[in-house]
Image (cartoon, rainbow, N blue to C red):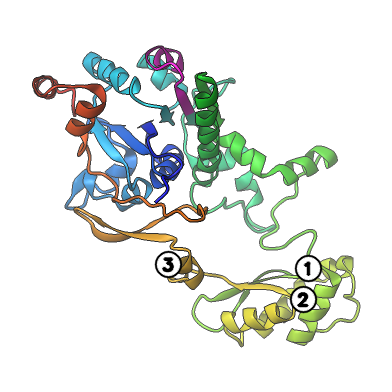
Amino acid sequence: ADALPFTGTVVLELGSGAAGPVATRFFAEWGATVIRIESARRPDFLRAYGGAGPHGLDGAPMFDSLNPGKASVTIDLKHPDGRDLLLRLVAACDAVSENFAPKALRNLELTFDVLRQVRPGLVMLSACLNGQTGPQRDYPGFGSQGAALSGYTLLTGWPDRPPVGPYGTITDSLAPRIGAAALAAGLHHARRTGDAVHLDLSQVEAAVWSLAPWLARAARTGAGTGRLGNASTTMAPHGVYPCLGTDRWVAIASWSDASWGRLADAAQLPTAGRDHLADRLADRDAIDAELAAWTARRTADAIADQLQAVGVEAVPVADLGDAHDDAQLAARHHLEHLEHPLLGPGDYERNSARITGRTSGYGSAGPLLGADTDRVLTDLAGVSGPELEALRAAAVLR
């Protein structure tokens, strides 16, 4: 079989949470060796979520799901010998990915300028909340702060209620996709030119960029869109409507006057005075109520089938069980079934892109803390058996 794009590439990962690990997960799936540098002294906070369970730091499902196919090496970077050991590993790597606040690596004297001295041609991705420059660069934070700072929180919710923000840590979902693309481009550039590359990714900036239409509108008009719930300023009807069953819904969007006509025919909705978008926007609440009364008597699948058949945008609103069992995702082999040594069998999401004619995957579940320390240090850093024993006795490998 043809090799995957990043077979032979070695990526060293520093950091925690999702923003960095999700970016490197792409590379683990597509053939790279991804090595997490961790420490029981200050573990990844996602590992700590398993602390109350029987397996402690090795039993956190979220950590496991974000880190399949990776290796784990434990090094105390605050120990002088730990720092030196990391530099030996960097010398054998192609890339470093980290998502600390900038001051963390400055304090450890492990900045890009230091690392590139031991590995000319190094590619480094730094993906913190606010980036490496600017007055807020050293402010550490997570996706909830990123959602608020970027504008997502204010946009999300109902017009007559306080903002609720998007579910989850949205910048931890947006930024890694950009980070992975940037890291791939950096590796390509370094291999062509031999130049070292430092990629400075701001999670907040990635989120602002994804809100470009709203930002442009605010710049032109001096006013933001405000919260619209499920409504739209350019489509009507546009929303999520109740269906038969417990907590079952269908999403429907009418993109044009013609689409509205087909929807009205199918759902037997009144059309007088509603031929044009401006009319429907003005009468949106009444249309939504009439449409909801129609959908509530039918299943989401039946509605979607009926409306799609006449060219109206309509899809069932999936819950996580629906997504797990989805036939389309199954046909694309979206989930890889793997066995975790402690948590047992589980399904691991692959990314959404496929390379025609090649099969990608992780091959293993998320790593146990420090499970690969001896092997990686021996193979990549040339650490001998006696040196490993001395490092362990000095509490460097913890």
Residue shown at 45% from the left, 53% from the top: 358
- Of residues 117 and 179, the one nearer the viewer is 117
Query: Closer to the N terminus: mark 2 or mark 3?
Result: 2
Q: Which mark is residue 236?
A: 1
Q: Is residue 158 visible?
A: yes
Front tag of 2 and 3: 3
State the quadrant of the C terminus. top left
Q: Give the residue at mark 2.
A: 287
* Residue 256, position as x, y percentages in the image: 82, 68
Q: Is residue 207 above or below residue 87?
A: below
Residue range of the region highlighted in magenta in the rendering: 112-125
Distance between mark 2 and mark 3 Cα atoms:
33 Å
Label 2 sits on a secondary structure element that is helix
Q: Is residue 350 left or right of residue 61?
A: right
Asked if residue 329 is among those painted magenta in the image, a careful observer would answer no
Residue type, label 2: Ile
Q: Give the residue at mark 3.
A: 324
Query: Closer to the N terminus: mark 1 or mark 3?
Result: 1
Front tag of 1 and 3: 3
* Residue 44, position as x, y percentages in the image: 32, 37
Callout 2–callout 1 Cβ contact below 8 Å: yes
Q: Which mark is residue 396?
A: none
- Of residues 29 and 98, the one nearer the viewer is 29
Distance between mark 1 and mark 3 Cα atoms:
31 Å
Label 1 sits on a secondary structure element that is loop
